[in-house]
Image (spheres, rainbow, N blue to C red):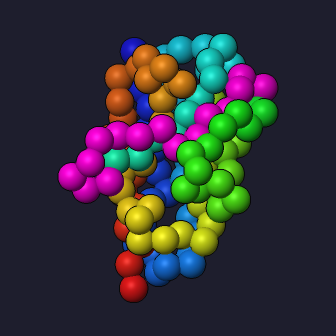
């Protein structure tokens, strides 16, 4: 069955960095555009970044442009999110899925940005 397993979150100070990873299984990874999403406390889930099947960065929400970078390793069925210059408003649970959120959600990885 489809599994999405996110990792790499943590507690960081403002200005810090994290590298999030998501390992996918149960589907043909290279056939799908992949995205990172996040859900801040008390808010809905939002799309953060999307990458094409062959690794071209497609889009980012305005609030993370220039700070976050999405990438993927198809041989490892893994999508990454490099998050730099983190701000308190980046706090939330980060999830991966395809760009249509077709698959069951994983458990996510918690990112907390606080001084």
- Highlighted magenta segment, given as a residue range: 40-54
Q: As drawn, which residue projects farthest toward the bottom?
A: 115
- The number of numbered badges drawn on the structure is 0
Residue in the picture at 65% in, 54% down:
65
Q: Position of residue 35 (x, y in %)?
A: 55, 34
Q: Quadrant of the C terminus?
A: bottom left
Q: Position of residue 27 (x, y in %)?
A: 53, 14
Q: Quadrant of residue 34?
A: top right
Q: Is residue 51 left or right of residue 18?
A: right
**Whether residue 6 is situated above or below residue 53 in the rendered picture:** below
Q: Position of residue 48 (x, y in %)?
A: 52, 43
The reply to whether the magenta stretch includes residue 53 is yes
Residue in the picture at 49% in, 57% down:
8
> Can see residue 95?
no
Q: Position of residue 16 (x, y in %)?
A: 56, 76
The reply to whether the magenta stretch includes residue 99 is no
Residue in the picture at 49% in, 79% down:
14
Q: Is residue 11 left or right of residue 66?
A: left
Q: As drawn, which residue projects farthest toward the left?
A: 42
> Can see residue 111?
yes
Residue in the picture at 56% in, 45% down:
61
Nearer to us in this view, 55 or 3: 55
Q: Quadrant of the N terminus?
A: top left
**Whether residue 30 is situated above or below residue 111 in the rendered picture:** above
Q: Quadrant of residue 60?
A: top right
**Whether residue 114 is situated above or below residue 35 in the rendered picture:** below
Nearer to us in this view, 115 or 46: 46
């Amino acid at each position: 069955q489809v599994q999405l397993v996110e990792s790499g979150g943590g507690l960081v100070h403002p200005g810090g960095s994290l590298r999030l990873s998501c390992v996918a299984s149960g589907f043909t990874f290279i056939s799908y555009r992949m995205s990172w999403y996040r859900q801040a406390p008390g808010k809905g889930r939002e799309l953060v970044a999307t990458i094409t099947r062959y690794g071209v960065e497609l889009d980012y929400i305005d609030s993370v442009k220039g700070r976050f970078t999405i990438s993927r390793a198809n041989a490892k069925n893994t999508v990454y999110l490099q998050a730099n210059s983190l701000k308190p408003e980046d706090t939330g649970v980060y999830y991966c899925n395809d760009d249509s959120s077709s698959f069951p959600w994983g458990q996510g990885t918690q990112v907390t940005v606080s001084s």
